[in-house]
Amino acid sequence: MPKDEVIITDLLDGNIKIFSELDNYFKEVVCDNIRSHPNRLNILKSCFSKIQPEYPYHAFLMAFDLPEYASICEYILLKNPSILTNNRLFYELLSCNHWIIDYVDTHLDQVVESNFDNIFCLLRYSFQYHKDTWLNHLINHPDLLIRIHTMYTMICDFPHLFKKYYPNPISLLKVTHEDGKVDIVDESYLSKIAVLIILNLNDLTLYQELKNFIFTNYPSNTLASIIDTYIIVEDEEILKKLLLADIDELFKTSKNYKWQLYHYYQKHLSPELVSDFANQIRPFANLFPDEVIEGMSTRGLLTKFIELMHKYLELSTRAKCISNVGEGTCSYVYRVGDYIIKYSDKKYSYEESICPNLYLIAKNYEEIINRDYYGHVTGALEVQKYLSKVVLPAETELLAKWQNALKEEGYYLVDDLVGQKVGSNCLRLDDYHDADTKDPENLPEWFKKDPVVLVDRDLIYTYKPSSHN
């Protein structure tokens, strides 16, 4: 990065060339330096109007706290509401205590939806300046995700005020619509709140109420994992007593901690539960290290994996074995009779549709993909037919046909294996009728003769000739 004084001198002269060549991080550094510069107003007079059209976010950073630039900054924000994704910036905006207050009054939901962490700033300001309209809207928000995140932020950061604003939190956990449909708050937030009721308020009665609500209203929950995490980190004896008091129910309803309860608290579980679970996991428990099953459990996929394993073992007609087929950088593959079940702890593709359904790609008979709030894959299960005929990297003519066909369908692959495109990730179907298509007889003749498919359904994207030739 050029020295600050060089950039400042250029900006004073109205020259933004060097500024334009900086990456976003260093642009922000320059903006921060301008805000604290003694000659700030003159710098802005020289360069603001030139930077603002092309770099509105950075122009905003330079001037948001100056009364002289209030109207233009408000205009920039109206046109670019994603600016408030930066919750540190939003914190500073509220600290300025000027035009942003009127903006929030009319755009409160937009502020929150930009970044849920902005809720902390809104609550803090509301308590300090008695903005009850903001408080009431957030606490009773029609969007239950915002409502429960507000409750969670309150118990985390303002526990001394929690009971004042939540005299009856149970009443806020459901909404019944005119058509009779009932919406309910996100369980993972509620389980965290239940544990913090003990840690931050020491209120055993309210904890029991929330726990019973969780057991009654959700088919599975994350309560055990949250309790045990705090036991490990905080060494809280009261939490261990609460865990053991309900351990059978927590085990039966656990979404993401069943294996851990079985593994670490087995002597506290009823013998019937231990025996039944041991029988369920015995066929595959020793095929990969314990941490693989623990990861599957943590990602909320273990119960479904067990269901799929028994389902496809029953459906198998040729084989009834369960074995370890292999593993990749982020996946573990189990053979279950005539099928394989692939468990992935992440996916390299982040798109909503990770892979097209296409005759050139192994068919997924089942697909479960868990994502976080931001859409990133946190875990996946896929069921495919078990294939054993590997396409060797040396079969270049066949692989070229496969790649050309993929391109003709409008896709390209960015998965390189040992210097070879596709290679060992390609296998042959037993019969071209097993291809993922409604009309197998209409498939290309070369494919009917040698039906090769990619088994790793990841890193496949829509083809863009301008950037991928």
Image (cartoon, rainbow, N blue to C red):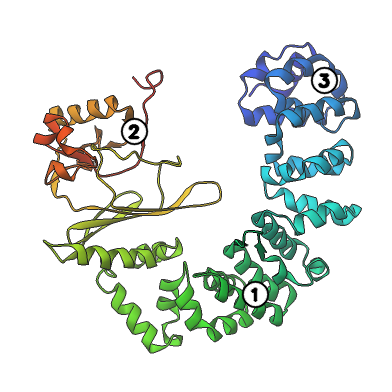
Placement of 327 over or under 45, stated as above or below: below
Placement of 429 over or under 378, stated as above or below: above
The amino acid at mark 1 is Leu
Q: Residue furthest front?
A: 179
Is residue 180 or residue 159 the one in the foreground?
Answer: 180
Q: Position of residue 436 (x, y in %)?
A: 24, 42
Circle 2 residue = 414
In contact (CB < 8 Å): disc 3 and disc 1: no
Q: Quadrant of residue 232?
A: bottom right
The amino acid at mark 2 is Val
Residue neighbourhood size for the residue with mark 1, other residues' Cα within 10 Å, grouped as few (<14), some (14–19), many (≥20): many
Q: Nearer the viewer, mark 2 or mark 1?
A: 1
Secondary element type, mark 3? helix
Secondary element type, mark 2? loop
The amino acid at mark 3 is Leu
Secondary element type, mark 1? helix
Could you tell whether 29 is left or right of 216 in the image? right
Residue neighbourhood size for the residue with mark 3, other residues' Cα within 10 Å, grouped as few (<14), some (14–19), many (≥20): many
Q: How far is disc 3 from disc 2 in space, using C-alphas?
A: 45 Å
Q: How far is disc 2 from disc 1 in space, using C-alphas?
A: 48 Å
Q: Position of residue 292 (x, y in %)?
A: 36, 62
Counting residues from the start of the chain, the first of labels 3 and 2 encountered is 3
- The circle on residue 44 is 3
